[in-house]
């Protein structure tokens, strides 16, 4: 009987992606087991606030880079009836000087 020749070692499979059908290690854009397309990657969360130190994406109440607290948000006002804006948008008068409407929460922009 003939001798078996040793098989060359197989390279380790690439990590690939795992399909919902259970097929693991799919290297391409489609599943090798069921043919489903690779799911789109989930983008990282966007938003947050920018700190004065330059750290732009701070999701919490404190800066991830320097530890400063998130600045308080000052409401800005604009008359919801006629569109008049005070010179200092964060400090409106009690009534709009153009139409007489009361400045309230409905006038916050």
Image: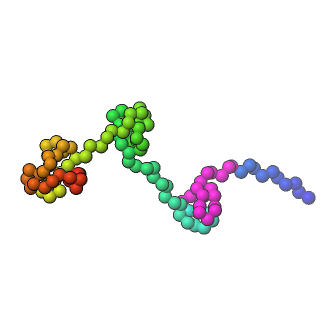
The location of residue 106, given as percent across then percent down, is 22, 55
The residue at 61%/51% (across/down) is 15
Q: Which residues are magenta?
A: 11-29
Quarter occupied by the N terminus: bottom right
The residue at 10%/54% (across/down) is 100
- Considering depth in this image, is 103 or 19 the residue closer to the camera? 103
Q: Is residue 57 left or right of residue 25?
A: left
Here the colouring is rainbow
Q: Is residue 54 left or right of residue 15?
A: left
- Considering depth in this image, is 78 or 18 the residue closer to the camera? 78
**Residue ranking furthest to the left:** 98
Write down the quadrant of residue 71 in the picture.
top left
The location of residue 28, given as percent across then percent down, is 56, 58
- Considering depth in this image, is 46 or 102 the residue closer to the camera? 102
The location of residue 80, given as percent across then percent down, is 17, 56
The residue at 17%/52% (across/down) is 103
Question: Compared with residue 50, is residue 109 higher up or lower down, i.e. above or below?
Answer: below
Q: Is residue 24 magenta?
A: yes
The location of residue 47, given as percent across then percent down, is 38, 48
Q: Is residue 13 magenta?
A: yes
The residue at 53%/60% (across/down) is 38
């Amino acid at each position: 009987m003939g001798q078996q020749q040793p098989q060359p070692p197989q390279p380790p499979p690439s990590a690939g992606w795992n399909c919902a059908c259970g097929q693991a290690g799919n290297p391409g854009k489609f599943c090798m087991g069921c043919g489903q397309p690779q799911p789109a990657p989930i983008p990282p969360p966007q938003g947050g606030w920018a700190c004065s130190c330059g750290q732009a994406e701070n999701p919490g109440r404190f800066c991830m880079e320097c530890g400063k607290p998130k600045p308080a948000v000052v409401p800005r006002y604009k008359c919801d009836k006629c569109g008049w804006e005070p010179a200092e948008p964060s400090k409106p008068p009690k009534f709009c000087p153009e139409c007489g409407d009361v400045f309230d929460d409905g006038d916050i922009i």
